[in-house]
Image (cartoon, rainbow, N blue to C red):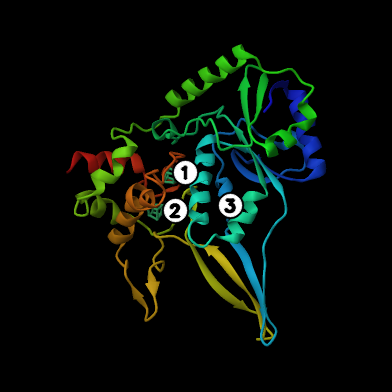
Amino acid sequence: MSIKKINIDTLNSWVDGIIEKQKVIGVQARGDRYAFGQLNKAADLRLDYDVAILPPKAFLQPPRETILSFQVGAGYESVVDSEPFVLFGVHPYDLVAMTQMDEIFSQGNNDVHYMTRRQNATVVVMDVQKVSQDVFAGYMGTAYVEDGYDVLLTKIGDEYIVDAKTGKGESLIAALLDKPDAGESWLEQRRLVWDYNRQRLRKHDLKVEPAKWPDILENAQEHPVWEERARLCFSCGSCILLCPTCYCFDVRDDLNWDLSSGERVRVWDGCMLTDFATVAGNLNFRKDRIDRYRHRYYRKGKYVPQKIGGRIACVGCGRCITACVANIANPVEVFNRVAEGK
Ligand code: SF4
Ligand code: SF4
């Protein structure tokens, strides 16, 4: 596969060329923050962003999606979104979260809605240029990636290394194949960028290795940290809705005014919301805040890792820390406390 070196003018004309041919979702400024959205021109792309408000999972598992439409008497029809698109500028930690989602949604009953979008997505990862206020990816092994992407961009000085890893990536960079190869010295500089990012994406000081999280949770159900923090929780759900590794959803039927047709929709849901665990008979098996609060950390540090080969369901993006108005959602603080044992 090809590894090229280009300048910003070439990058912009390459991106504009992709936009002419297919849908591109890229990071753009929203006031003083950044968000993924459909890109109309390369000039709007902000590859120097710190962190996107919502992770790119929103384009693979949208906050609300129709999964089938129905007509009483006529049956139903599945709705599957199969439009190809490019996700441009994904940070490495968000790519790692996507690879976890790939595993979750392909286990057991393959989720056709997620997997079809995923298979139609070409993912361009951008190595982090600007450090966000709460990121701790440097501790989570997610500050950079060496695989899992279709194309990887790394800014070195005023130029970019463009590394195509897959057939989809090679097709995407077809317009760049006459550009110079990035030689060994450029790849060595990329290695230095990765080392640098691993050191600087550490805005919170994690004292316990992620690999130990499942063990320290083993007998920690009665640890005082759960009650201390849970009593401040508003159950607003921001910490889980912004999280790139959270994937829970609700499914409901929306009936039209004719009372005979409608659609089945799937919407984001999550364990910090009050009614998430309510089942038939109006029984809520996690009705207390402490149960919901504790569950979130057990999910990140123990339950999901048991499903995906030990991988911790937190990539250190820091979004939950920034978003929590009660200042209680920081996984680093919680796991440091739990590891202390008191
Ligand atoms: S738990 Fe928080 S820091 Fe970890 S991946 Fe989710 S939002 Fe990011
Ligand atoms: S963001 Fe904070 S207040 Fe809101 S549910 Fe999460 S922990 Fe509770």
Quadrant the N terminus occupies: top right
Residue 134's x, y, as percent? 43, 36
Please tell me which residue lies in front, 62 or 319. 62
SS assignment at label 3 = helix
- Amino acid type for the residue under numbered disc 1: Arg
- Amino acid type for the residue under numbered disc 2: Ile
Q: Is the shortest distance between ligand 2 and the CB of mark 2 under 8 Å?
A: yes
SS assignment at label 2 = helix
Residue ID at (47%, 39%): 317
Q: Are marks 3 and 1 in contact (CB under 8 Å)?
A: no
SS assignment at label 1 = helix
Measure the alpha-carbon separation of dots 2 and 1: 9 Å
Q: Could one spot residue 167 in this view of the protein?
A: yes
Q: Is disc 2 surrounded by few (<14), some (14 to 19) or many (20+) residues within 10 Å?
A: many
Identify the residue under disc 1: 319
In the image, residue 191 sits, relative to residue 19, either above or below, namely above
Identify the residue under disc 2: 240
